Image (cartoon, rainbow, N blue to C red):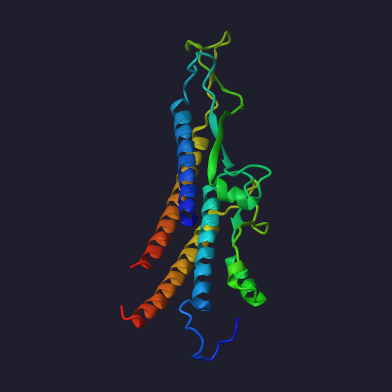
Amino acid sequence: MEAARPLDPSRPVEIYDTTQSALEKAILGASARQQAITQNLANVDTPGYQRVDVDFHKTLRDAMASGAGLQSATFSPRRDASAQVRPDGSTVDADVEASAQARNGLEYETLVQVSKARIDIIEAAMGR
Amino acid sequence: MGLFDALDTSGSALSAERVRMDVTAENLANAQSTRTANGQGPYRRKEVVLQEAGAGVGASFADSLRVARGVKVAGIVQDPSPSRRVYDPGHPDADAKGYVSMPNVNTVTEMTDLIGASRAYEANVTAMQTTKAMFARTLDILK
């Protein structure tokens, strides 16, 4: 994370700051994860299916740590090899997917709410 | 785009589970049928083969998730297990020794399959509702 800069009157004000673009990227990540979980639930009865997941937290953490900027962060689904294998070769557990989905849905909602609150502040400053 | 794809994925699962329920219902309906539609032998139990939908071998994994998603019915196959033999000399389809070949349908298996399909259907409806709720939240930003 870059350190907070002191206000410099000669610099243009950034309406869309790092936090806002990080929030947007996180929303995209949560949406990608939702797609992966949906895919797993759709294949709950497919023998031999290997579950997929999107670890967007790690992607964002790495992008922020590397200093390369958040724009470079892309969320790609990966096969999850660590999951418990069922007798039919599938690694989907409906309960695990359901709780992951509930958690991801709440996280998405939080991100959207915070994002909207920040936009509302900017709008208030604009006198709307 | 994004969450719309998730809706399609859940939709594909709903129709696949519906096919499973249809086939199970057909098996139960024909549990006592000693003749098939073309008049040969007893009814044989049918089973649905599900397959992960994707762009196929060769395409990168990320592509396979982007292009086609969800699950598809790869085919409906016949269960090759032997048919039940029931002694019933009065039956029109009895053989010389008085045995009738009955379908290889086991009611308990079918009921278990039915419950499984129904639960999977419910899980996917829930997934669809979550996706819808997430989408509705995003629209709230515009308000």
Residue B48 pos. (x, y %): 54, 35
**Vertical arrangement, residue B27 with respect to residue A115, above or below:** above
Q: Quadrant of residue B101?
A: top right
Q: Is residue A69 left or right of residue A16?
A: right
Residue A121 pos. (x, y %): 38, 80
**Vertical arrangement, residue A120 with respect to residue A51, above or below:** below
Q: Is residue B20 left or right of residue B77?
A: left
Residue furthest toward the front?
A: A10
* Viewer-side residue, B42 vs B66: B66
Residue that appears at 38% across and 68% down: B141
User: Quarter of the image containing the C terminus of chain A?
Assistant: bottom left
Residue furthest toward the left?
A: A128
Residue A30 pos. (x, y %): 52, 64
User: Quarter of the image containing the N terminus of chain A?
Assistant: bottom right
**Vertical arrangement, residue A44 with respect to residue B24, above or below:** below
Residue that appears at 54% across and 64% down: A29
Residue that appears at 45% across and 79% down: A15
